[in-house]
Amino acid sequence: MRKDKEQSLSEVLRQFIETNKLEKGLTEAEVIRLWPEIMGPGVANYTKNIQFSKGVLKVYLSSAVLREELLFGRKKIIAMYNEALNGDYIKSVLLV
């Protein structure tokens, strides 16, 4: 079906995402993609798995020492993530 008015590609993509309810999945993928960028390669090397659901970022680490260090910086991790995502998506961080 062809529309008479012209639309920018970004507007068409935004409408497609909204129509198909893809925001949640795209946000989750972006959160996981950003972890090495925000935390750096040193932390990323000790990361086994990352999950994001309902505002909770759950990070599985292979180093107990690193886990303890990151526990003290949870508020900063949340702030850096929300700044990178341009919104208030991350509510809490669980380090496992």
Image (cartoon, grey):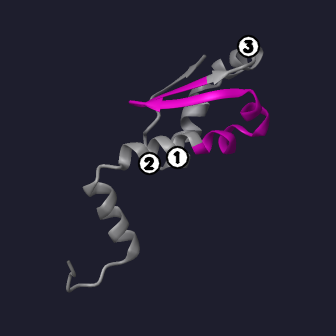
Location of residue 41 (image quadrant): top right
Residue 8: percent from left, percent from top: 36, 77
The secondary element bearing badge 2 is classed as helix
Report the residue marked by disc 3: 64
Disc on res. 86: none
Residue at 69%, 18% (x, y): give it.
Answer: 67
Which numbered tag is attached to residue 30? 1
Q: How many marks?
A: 3
Amino acid at the residue labelled 3: Ala
Residue 3 sits above or below residue 45 on the image: below
Identity of the amino acid at label 2? Answer: Leu
Answer whether residue 72 is visible to the viewer in this image: no
- Residue where numbered disc 2 is placed: 26
Query: Which secondary structure, mark 3?
Result: helix
Please tell me which of labels 1 and 3 falls first in the chain: 1
Magenta stretch, residue numbers:
33-59
CA separation, marks 1 and 2? 6 Å
Other-residue count near label 3 (Cα within 10 Å), few / some / many at <14 / 14–19 / ≥20: few
Front-lying residue, 75 or 95? 95
Q: Secondary structure at mark 1?
A: helix
Asked whether 77 falls inside the magenta stretch, the response is: no
Label 2: how many Cα within 10 Å (few below 14, some 14–19, many 20+): few
How far apart are the two marked residues, 1 and 3, measured between alpha carbons? 26 Å
The spot of residue 38 in percent (x, y) is: 66, 42
Characterize the local packing of mark 1: few (<14), some (14-19) or many (20 or more) Cα atoms within 10 angstroms. some
Q: Residue at x 74, y 40 (%)?
A: 40
Left/right of residue 24 with respect to residue 37 in the rendered view: left
Tag 1–tag 2 contact (CB < 8 Å): yes
Q: Residue at the location (52% across, 30% down)?
A: 51
Residue 90 percent location from the top left of the image: 47, 34
In the image, is 32 to the left or to the right of 20? right
